[in-house]
Image: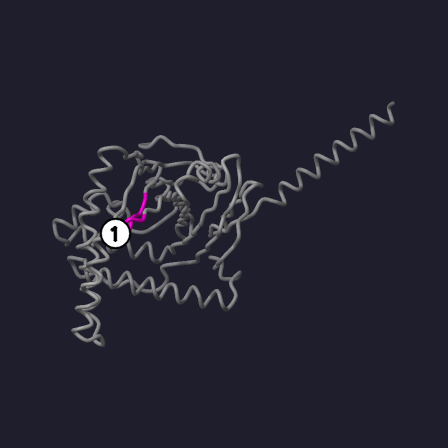
Amino acid sequence: MRTLNKKFITLAFATCLTVGMGAVACADTVDLGYGMYGSTSPMVKAVEVMHVPTDAKLRNNEQNQMLFAANKEVVNAINANLKWHSSVPVNPIKGEVLDGFSYYQLQGTNEQGHHVASLLVIDYAKSGLDQAISMDKMVLEKGSEADKARFKNSPSKHVDAYSKETAQKQLASLPGDTVEGEKLAKAVKVINDNIPSHINDTFDKLLAADKKTSAKDKEVISTFAGFMAKQLTVDATHVAYKPIQTRYGTAVTGDVRGAVGFDSFRNSFALIGYAIPADKGLSLQLLYADDSSYDYWTNELTHMYQTQSLKGGK
C-alpha cells in the first residue's frame, strides 16, 4: 500500500510539473523596450510582426536601417506640423525621436469566443522628449494666447528635461478622469463638425507645397478630399485615464471605446494605452481591438502589467 501511495504521489507530482511547465511554455513574451518585457497569459498567443529593440547591441543591420528610416519620417512629420501650426518660430526637431518599436498580433479564446488584437509598442528617446519640452516652453513663453491656453496644463511647465523620476511623480499626481454620456456626446459632436475643415486644410497645405502637380489636378484632389471628409464620422461611448502602479513602476493607462463610420459603414473599436517611464525614454503601448473584446483585453493587460490603481493627487 505504501508503495502504491508513493507511485501515486510521484505520478501526481509529475503531472502537476508537466502541466505547470506547459503553461509557462505557452506564455509568450513581448518586448516593451528599455529592458522591460511582458508575458501573456497561457491562453494568449503573441506573434511578432515587427521588432526593433531599443538596445543597439541587439539590433541587426536591417533593424538599424528600419529605425533610421522611421526616425527620419517622424522628424520630417513633426517639423512640417510645427511649421504649419506653431504660432512662434521653434527650433526644428533633430536627431533620434525613437529608440525602437514593435508590433504584435495577439489572439486568445475564452467562453465568449475568439479574440484578436494588435499591440503597437513605441519607445520615445530621451533626446526627443527633451526637445519636445523645450518647444512647449517656447510656446508657453512666446506663443499666441490660443496656444498658451492649449499648453496651460503641459507638464513641461515644471521641468527642463525628461527624467524617469520626475515623469513618475507627475503621473502619480494625475487625478484620473472618465468621460461618458452627454458630456462625451458634446465633445464628439465638436470633433465631427471639425473633421471636414481639418482634413481640407491639411490637404490644401500639402497641395500648396507640391510643385509638381498641376493646378487642375490639385483642384480635383481637393474636391475629392472634401467629399470624402464629409462621409467620415467618429463616435465614442467611453474615454478614461488614470495613474497606476505596474511591475515596471508608476505609469498611466487610458482607453477609448467607440466607432469610426464612413458613409453607411460603421466599425466599433477599443483602444487601450499604457505609458511607462524608463531611464532612457518613455515606452508607449497601444492595443487595438474590436469593442466586443474590450473586457477580455483589459483583463489580459492587467495580468501582463500587474496593474494596481493609484489615487491621483499623491
Depth check: give the residue in front, 301 or 90. 301
* Along the viewing direction, whichever of 294 and 12 lies nearer the viewer: 294
Residue 93 left/right relative to 278: left
User: In the image as oriented, which residue stretches furthest toward the top?
Assistant: 1
Depth order, front residue of 75/140:
75
Count of marks placed on residues: 1
Asked if residue 262 is among those painted magenta in the image, a careful observer would answer: yes
Q: Is residue 55 left or right of residue 242?
A: right
Of helix, strand and loop, which mostly describes the magenta segment?
strand
Question: Which region shows up in magenta?
Answer: 259-265
Please, is residue 65 above or below residue 263 in the view?
below
Q: What residue appears at the point 36 percent right and 37 percent down from the top-left corner?
A: 243
> In the rendering, at what x and y percent does residue 310 appear?
38, 32
The residue carrying mark 1 is 232
Residue at x-position 37% and y-position 44%: 271
Is residue 150 or residue 113 the one in the foreground? 113
Q: Is residue 153 above or below residue 127?
A: above
Would you say 129 lies left or right of 16 here?
left
Q: Is residue 144 part of the magenta span, yes or no?
A: no
Q: Please identify the residue farthest to the front as the structure is shown.
A: 264
